[in-house]
Amino acid sequence: MSTTKTRDLARPAAAKASPAKPRRALRGSPTFNFWLFTGPFLIGLAIFVYAPILWSLWLSFFEARFTVTPDKFVGFENYTYMLTNDDFVGSLGTFTVFAAFIVPTTWALSLGLALLVNRLRFMRAFFRSVFFLPTACSYVAASLIWKMSIFSGVRFGMMNTVLGWFGIENIAWLADPSPPWYWFVIVTARLWLQSGFYMILFLAALQNIPGELYEAAAIDGAKPGWQTFRYITLPQLRATSTAVILLLLIAAYQAFDEFYNLLSKTTWGRPPLVELYYKALGESQDYGAGSAGAVILTVLICAVTLLQGKFLGFGRGEESK
Amino acid sequence: MSAMSNSNWSRRSLFRAAAGMAAAGTLAACGGNNGRGGGSGSGVGLTQYFHAYGEQGTEQAIKKYAKAYDKADVTTQWITSADFESKLFATLLTKNAPDLFEFHPQIQLIKSGQVADLTDIVTPVKDDFNPADIKSHTVDGKIYGVRMIDDPQFFFYRKSMLEKAKVEVPTTLDELAEAAAKLTTGKVKGLYMGNDLHNVIDTMIWSAGADHLTDKNEIAYHTPGVIEGLKKMRKLFTSGDLLLGAPTESWDPSSLNQGLCAIQFCGMWAMPGIQAALGDDWGVFPFPKTIDSGKQSVYNGGWSMFVNAKGENVEAAKEYVKWLWIDQKKYQEEWATAFGFHIPPRTSLAQTATKLKSGNAAEGVRLFNEFGHFDNIGWTQAMRTSLEDVFANSVRKDMDPEAALDKADTAVNRELKKLFG
């Protein structure tokens, strides 16, 4: 799609600038411009994305311990090992629980924030910035703040201090897995970090909804508030919502930083990437098994994305609206 | 949009500045990575990795020693301890690998050809080393690392708190649990063994009369005593008498120093810090007997220097290790006793280290000699992780210890099979 667009745009410009030049000259030809602009990206993509993926694929069929240039071919042994490994399969379950919770919550929270900020009559820029600011914070930094000051297990941790006012015993938020308070810590950290960004997306979409629609609805007798929101705003946000959900799902799949920093050395609460890191990559240095796991994950992500596209119609373009 | 008129100018200058910075960054990166940035003309550049020691002055000391060496430029990377293993293992596979690094003896480094044979530099002074330190670094008659410091790990306790609660120094795990219960008050928890309890895994196994591996490199940790120990640890974990979720890990004595707990598992290195914070109000004791038929134990950890066998300057790196960790006894003594307390692995130094001759330090040395267990070189990082998983599953979660150990057996046997066939 982008190819045709580039051509359409480039052609009139080229014709206008140099009508005398031969059409086939390399300079200024649409093909040349196309490669000039996409080339660097394609090279980067090839070196930093496709080459590692292919290398992983190759590694996954070898016994690669403490080396990334192995020579012992083992066929599908690494795949059998990963797929029969309870922890790895369990981590897919962990991911599902995490995604099932974090995706709708972030969606609702960022939409809510966007609606609130959109309603503001004054200081809108201020609040927009305030809510967006956490996006600029790194997951690692936030995890450390969450772990050491807000949800520290000692009596002077912030949450424990607050609970102490009501006479509630100290809670070891992250150290003790039962009850699983660690989910509360992880979910709040992620909500704080990412809601602002999706709020901006929703805000842009909200400001794109034509005012006439609301006027027409009002004339037709739609009550302001829930009815207008349900039948006008929400359908108008469909494209953005779908994109946001897809982005959230991918972000959830890639979750690593806060799990790694908040839950070090556990056997629970490990999404697939963290599990892979502990099982095969980090200290164990079993790159064969690690790559097999990575390939399994890649296939899963592709499948889920395609399925989601089929059901929610992301990327189908205008006709689906 | 009043800035419109000069937006071209600023965009261009911005771009130029960015390009300049990128170029400068690349140059700086070259200098930083290969350790040849100094350009002092002495020829060889060496890079060494150290984990970040907690004590004041340690980083400066290591850099001072490096500077005093005139046959090579030695750059030091000082790496946060939580990331040390992963960073070290990952870079060892690349061209940016350090020429020399500190670590613990683990056989996979030798089997995969990552560390160089140091037999020729150690042999002349072999008799001056603690025999256990030589043994733990030897595979098939070759010595692969030079021990810098020995770090016994045991419990530290507040004498006044134990007296007030009328608690004796515990000698069994049951007594330890009782003590923790009696010592717990509204503001103080009885016992701190780290947020994940993983630092006491090894001692708990030894105190149960078991070991990690047999002499023939078969599993030796899966015994009824260890299972009983795991059950006791689970009970302790859920008792509410443990300090959990503390801001500092157990290698840092802050929790004890700040009065968050009455007893803490830590290492000999922390002694000067504890002395400064608590005066004489503290003592040490070994890990108590896990079961009645067991024996108290102490983990004799420590750090050793290794040379990257795949590096470009193996000989130069070996020479530096020999110069500093074999020849420079003054530096070795300073490194072992001037910051945190460590026991020098060289017998001649250990005998003259006056700071370790009195008080709790002397008691630490006694525990080291009487109850200490050294690293088993065949016990690798992956196996370590398997037992950490056992603790996570059956002490911090309520999985059946037997099932958790079975799971570890599978993982450890996979490792053993790959290493020893």
Image (cartoon, coloured by chain):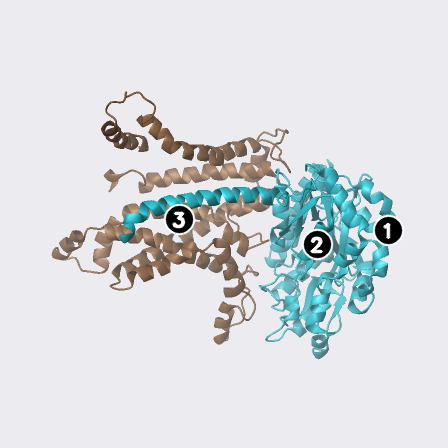
First-in-chain label (1 vs 2):
2
Q: State yes or no: discs 1 and 2 in contact (Cβ < 8 Å).
A: no
- Amino acid carrying label 1: it is Asp
**Colour for chain B in the figure:** cyan
Label 1 vs label 2: CA separation?
25 Å
Q: Can you say which quadrant of the picture contains the N terminus of chain A? A: top left
Circle 3 chain: A
The residue positioned 48% from the left and 36% from the top of the image is: A48
Check disc 3 and give the amino acid type. Answer: Leu
Name the residue carrying label 3: A248
Q: Secondary structure at mark 3?
A: helix
Quadrant where the C terminus of chain A sits is top left
**Pointer 3: residues within 10 angstroms few (<14), some, or many (20+)?**
many
- Colour in which chain A is shown? brown
Q: Is residue A287 left or right of residue B99?
A: left
| Residue A92: percent from left, percent from top | 49, 45
